[in-house]
Every structure is written in C-alpha cells, then in structure tokens.
Image (cartoon, rainbow, N blue to C red):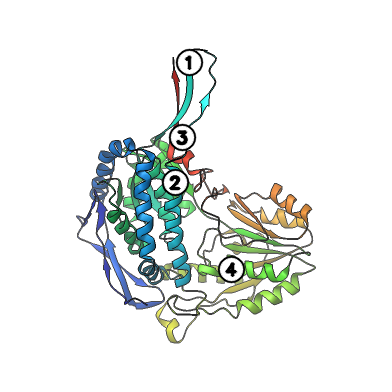
Amino acid sequence: MAVKTFNEFSNYINGGWVPSNTKEGVTNRNPADLSDVVGSVQKSSAEDLEQAVTAASSAKREWRKLSGAERGNYLYKAAGLIENRKEDIAQCMTREMGKTLPEAKGETMRGAAILRYYAGEGMRKTGDVIPSTDKDALMFTTRAPLGVVGVITPWNFPVAIPVWKTAPALIYGNTVVLKPATEAAVTCAKIFECFEEAGFPAGVVNMVTGPGSVIGQGLADHPEVGGITFTGSNSVGKQIGQSALARGAKYQLEMGGKNPVIVTEDADLDQAVDATISGGLRSTGQKCTATSRVIVHSGVYEAFKEKLTAKVQEINTGNGLNEGVWMGPSVSESQLNTVLHYIERGKEEGGTVLCGGERLTGGEYDNGYFVAPTVFEDIETNMTIAQEEIFGPVLALMKVDSVDEAIELANDVEYGLSASIFTTNVQKMLAFIDDMEAGLVRINAESAGVELQAPFGGMKQSSSHSREQGEAAKEFFTDIKTVLVK
C-alpha cells in the first residue's frame, strides 16, 4: 500500500491552481482514524467563484467550436490518467470519506469508464432530418450547449458523480465550474489533477471548494451560468432549483431516496438476503439508492429475518484501508449523529432492534465514526424511519400478505428513486414494473446501482424528473435548435 501523504489543494481556475483570496482552508480527516489528516482544500468566497465563472465564460466559445471528436480526445486522455492513478485516488477516497478500498478502486475505475463512454459520444449524431412541407427546404435539428454549467456534487461518490456530470457537459460543448462537497473535496481535486495533465484548455474545467451557501448558491444565482446540475439533499436541491428557475436557467436535481425491496413468498431467500445487505449496508448505507425498507411476505418473513440478521451480525466493520473490512464509518461526526438520531427515533416509536442499533466503541472504534449495521422490525409505514432518508446502515423490516399490499406500502413515501423485487413469478414482476413509482426498478437485484450507459434518476421528490448518464444526459446539457434551409 502506498505511503499516506498530506494533500493540500488550491482551487483549479483557468488552467491553474489558485489559492482562495480568503486565505482560509478546511482540513479533512479520516473518519475511521481521526489522527490521520488526509489533506486540505480552500474555504472560498464569492470573489473566487466569480473568477472561475469568468474563466469558464471566456473559454466557452472556443471549446464549443471544437469538433466532438476533438473534445472527446481530452476525455480519453483524462480517463487513462485516472486509471493509471487508481491506487492513489482510491486510497485517498477511503481515507477521506470512509468507504472500503475495494469499493473506492471500483468507483475510480468507473470514473475512467464514464469518461471513455462520453468521449465516444463526440462521434455520435446530434440531430435528425425532419421532412418539411416546403419541397425546396431542408429542415433538421442540431444541439447547442448551454454555455457555462455549474456542477454541485455530494461526498458519497467523490469520483463517479463529479465525472458523470462533468463528462457529458464537456463533450456536448459546455464549460464547467464544479463545487464538490467539502467532506470529499481532496479526492475530487485529484481528478482535476488528471484533467490538468490531460491538457484541457484554460477555463474549460474549473473547481472551487467552499461553503454550499456561498459557492453552491452562488452558482445557482449567477447570470452567466446557463445550467445547474445538483446531487444532494431535498432541502438544498429545491432551493437551488428555485434560484435557477427564477432567472430562467436550466436545472437538474437528483435528491433523496427511501428505497424498498420486496421479497415475495416464491423468492430465492438467499439471493434476496445477500442483495438486501449489499444494497442497504455497503458504503455504510450512504447511497441515495441504498435499500432502506425491506417488505417481506408473511409466509417467508421469519425465515428471511433469521437469514438476514445472522449475516448482518457477521459484517466486519472497521477502517476501510484494512483487508477484510466490509463496512467503513459514517463520513463525519454530523452524519454519525444523524444516523444515531434515527435509530433512537425508531426505538421510541415502537420499532424492535434485531441487531446493531448503537455506536461501536472500544479499540479503533473510539477514534472514528462507527455505527453497527442495524436491523429493525415491527415498523409501521407512518414511523419516521419508514418515511425519512437516513443515509446510514439501517434496514427496516415490514411484513405484508400480498404483492399488491407490498407495492402499495413501497409507494407510500414522498420519494421515488429506486426499488427492487425478488420473485420467480412473471406476473408479479410485471405488476411491480407497471405499478412501482420509481425511476429505477430492478428485478432480483439490489436496489443500489445503475450501469453508466443507462439513464439514472427518480420520480416524485427524488428528482426534477430529468435523467443523468447514458444518452439521456444529452437532453439536459444541450438545447435543441431547429434549422430550416431554403
């Protein structure tokens, strides 16, 4: 394993690393080992953001005029650099936000794969020929970039999410100003080192770190920013969307989830248990697509519960850098306290803890933000932990007597991001596909995850109803222009 290092980053603006004019920084520590200082980033101001937006605005015309293939070459170069630095980036990610090293390596490689996918988009069609009623006219559509795109990303996927927003923005001819979550900004800065070495022209990609109330809100309010793409909490997302709407900018919001898994009486229980644990507890449950509610048919409830709790109690929780550790810490003290708060609410409202339900203490646990993977039962749909996103390793078991009841219960939340069902019955599969109010529906697979070439996004309060990833990203990052040639 590489030697641990301290990483100190300025903002990346106009092709160079620029210290904030505040002269202030933020230091990030390993949530599994608070004595391990990972690095620092800038606590930037509105003036720093203005500098970045000005640079992006100045660069947008020349970047747009490059061919899609020329823009794609920069993405290909960046992908290779990320792949070559996989070990360093992944270790930084594990140290900074806590996910295990194998997960961090997988996410880093996914970032490289996303860049290569969108590099190829530079050679694909951008419009359609449409018949005109005028026999002497040619009518077709083409696509125009938005200009400067503001990108606001969370801490739970510090490589994948910045890349899956930035790559399509760039390939379709936009320039970018990115504000990463401070908790994982050191890892994100390492991706920008790769962008720098790939030779992107000055001003095309920019990164400014700092408070969301200053940098994130500043992007939403800025008149030169033509589009905002955001992933994060519902409360902040709605505020970003309202600000963008007020000035006529395009916006894309990916927000919370309260994702159900349905286990029918004909399900393969071992498969369902393994997928529920992976979907709900991997990455310490810190995914918007993580399984939260487990809705089980009464005929197999006891058998499923026994298998699930036995396996959950075998999970090895610890520092994600250590071999054999399956689940790491919460990302911060604040997030740990949030998870513990929800666990206590679950107990107070009548839920029964089958396993976990507490902060882990003793030994290495005392120097980090660890919570035991937790399983509740006796959960009613009106309870807090059945309705609100926890973003932690907490599963709530709920018992039903039919698939119709299960789907009704699964839909009884304000969110609609991801959902899965375990069944061998085709009729139940089809009913689930038709009736489930979610942007991602998965059959005999965990609720978390989507392939990079497929559209990603939710329904109801989970999304602003646009889609990320795959070809669907083109719909947000460009505007259609209809052309008639007489």
First reached walking from the N terminus: tag 1 or tag 4:
1
Identify which amino acid the numbered label 4 is placed on: Ser
Q: CA distance from mark 2 to mark 4?
A: 32 Å
Q: In the image, residue 335 lies at what x, y percent? A: 45, 67
Q: How many marks?
A: 4
Cα distance between the residues tagged 1 and 2: 32 Å
Residue 120, which numbered label? 2
Q: Label 1 is placed on what type of residue?
A: Ala
| Residue 231 visible in this rendered orientation of the protein | no
User: Could you say where residue 177 lies in the image, as x and y percent from the top left?
Assistant: 32, 48
Q: Which residue is mark 3?
A: 126
Mark identifier at residue 278: 4
Q: Quadrant of the C terminus?
A: top left
Q: Could you tell me which secondary element the residue under label 2 belongs to?
A: helix
Earlier residue among tags 2 and 3: 2
Q: Position of residue 194 (x, y in %)?
A: 32, 58
Q: Identify the residue under disc 1.
A: 137
Q: Is residue 474 left or right of residue 25?
A: right
Q: From the viewer's perspective, is the residue at label 2 or at label 4 nearer?
A: 2
